Image (cartoon, helix red, strand yellow):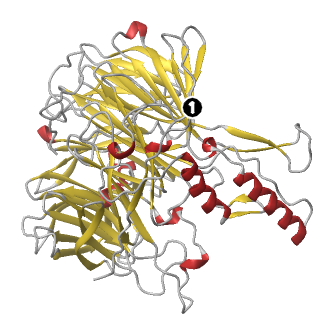
Amino acid sequence: MRRTTILLVTAIAVVAAACTSSPTTGPGSTSYRLGGDRGPAGPALFAAPALQAFDSCDAFLSYVKGHALERVGPYGLEGYDGFLPTDAVFAVEDAAGPDRAAPTTTAASGAAGVDYSTTNVQVAGVDEPDLVKTDGDRIFVVARGRVFWIDATGTPRIVASMPLDGWGQQLFLAGDRLLVMTSVDGYGVEPLAGSGIVDDVVRGPSPRTVLTEVDVSDPATMTAVRTLTMDGTIVSSRMTAGSVRVVVRSGPTGFAWAYPEGGGIRAEREATAENRRIVENSTLENWVPWFVFEDHRTRTTSEGPLLGCDQVGHPDEFSGLSMLTVLTIDLASGLEPGAGVGLLAEGQTVYASTESLYVATAPWMVRPLPETTGPAGERDRLSTQIHMFDITDPTVARYVASGEVEGTLLSQWSMDEYDGILRVVVTDEDPWWGSSEVPDSSVVTLRRMGDRLVQVGSVDGLGKGERVYAVRFVADRGYVVTFRQVDPLYVVDLSDPTDPRVAGELKITGYSAYLHPIGADLLLGVGQDATDQGRALGTQVAVFDVSDPAAPRRMARLTFDEAYSDVEWDHRAFLWWAAEDVAVLPLQRWSWDERTGKEDPFSGAVVVRATPDRVVQVGEIRHPSASGSDCAGCGGWSAPIVRSLVIADRLFTVSDAGVLVSELGSYDDVAWLEFAS
């Protein structure tokens, strides 16, 4: 059993800074406040009993400046260059708890999961952001830089649209409120060091996030109600019972660094000295993300630091100078910049149950430091820090604990919470330096004890020398797929979290990159078929019987030669409709037909019926090209399908060109709804 260190977290519970001005109202007005009252603060945000508080914002600045001075050099603060990575998740349960109902002002027809499909999510009752959202009557789609409203009742038709700025838009829908989350690129401007000429500028990336609340009560008045713009990029987000938790990572901002003029040691030392002075003179605004909040109905604007000092904590083991903010938005009340909690830590992977949210730090985000080298010259293995937040309160997330596991995570699927136990799949290879030993993977179980996530059990030896390709937890079992040349499917018995064990494994060629439960003790795997040497041959859909955990079996499979599917890396592209025993998955193929001497492309979606006895294709969907008609000279290539959903007896498939409506069962075309730019 490997050693697992525990990361304790200390709160920064301090009095908000002064510099608070009274907000003004009226058309075009602006209110500025620094560290004002924007929700619960101090101990209310940090529920861990052992947390210690700073005395003031001066203590916060002393902390960040002290660590920055250790890392600043002739080219600024190394490791904080503005490029902030994002997060590249079944039965449907009621997301509303006993004391709170999800906000619904427009009654939708039918029940989710019965009369219409929803976003394919990791945890029942925990919604995930997506390009497409529906309530059974309305479909909202992000495409071509706009959000389109489709009336799915009667004869489907596009009834409204509105333009969007930026890129990477994702949606949440709650009642008559649509939350649009967008990434935009900004640029910082600074004079060239030593030039004294304002026109000589260095422009660096300054990523920011825009959240827009859209009123969708009436398609004739579809409009943005409020907009919140803030520094940083979205790591990921989740919604439970109408409350959205948005995790944003931001770095230090507003530093006009000096750079060496010419070359040589002297120039570098002078630049370093100047940059140290810049750090020493920094203010709260350099370390906490800034926000601008616009209420379009009242035409008022407010701005300031997104977090007050009493809303920020830090691990007692230094974990970086980036700010990880968990922002809570109660869509029943509307978008507000207030209820946030921040950690001075990195974060890349987000998992959430209905009660807890976990943010994991990807080790490759923490650049190797000299002190990580051991006495024998061997580098310590990197570990993954995991931060836990309580999200049972719909108005705020509260930090409760942190822990650390040795190794790296594949994705959000590597974490799962069950009966108070967090199960984590890790691989012990160092992503920066490789490994002198043959890497393998483990399943680690952790339990919250006070403000710590403490390891209580583990089992290793999964896929020695292989990568993890897929993970799925179902109740007290875990399923792990590793691959190099063959595909071992491991069944892990987690019924005793203090003594997890590998119950059985299945070795076959190829691999599954996504696993989906399709019935009692049945899994559907989507991935690639492969040769005995590990060369991928094409998309494979397979059914596995795991009724006997000691002897998992592949019952049936279907391979699409020289093809790939988005499902392999984006689970939201997958649709399973249990009433018909069918899966819909986008498929791409660009191959050469040696018999005809012509290209043999396919871009669309396939409908596959999967039962324990066989997997067979029962439908094929193609869209027109983005121009609205077949693409001349494209050899049959059509607009790639990215999402699919079922409403009543119809299948809706979505591409950037439009939405194709097909009859469920026959899969004959019913209507084509083209998106206009």
Q: Position of residue 206 (x, y in %)?
A: 64, 42
Q: Amino acid at mark 1?
A: Gly
Instruction: Please name whichever residue, 557 or 244, is drawn nearer the observer in this view of the structure.
Output: 244
Q: Position of residue 606 (x, y in %)?
A: 31, 43
Residue under the image location 27 percent in, 79 percent down: 460
Extreme residue toward the front, this view: 55
Q: In the displayed structure, does residue 63 sit left or right of residue 107?
A: right
Residue 284 visible here:
yes
| Above or below, 23 relative to 358 | above
Q: Position of residue 438 (x, y in %)?
A: 41, 85
User: Which residue does the image show at 11% across and 74% down from the upper left?
Assistant: 551
Q: For the C terminus, which image quadrant?
A: top right
Percent from the top left, x then y, of residue 236?
A: 41, 45
- Which residue carries the number 1 mark? 304
- Height in image: 342 above or below 217? below
Query: Above or below — where is 304 with respect to 491?
Result: above
What quarter of the picture does the N terminus occupy?
bottom left
Inspect this view and state whether residue 559 appears.
Answer: no
Quarter of image, res 451: bottom left
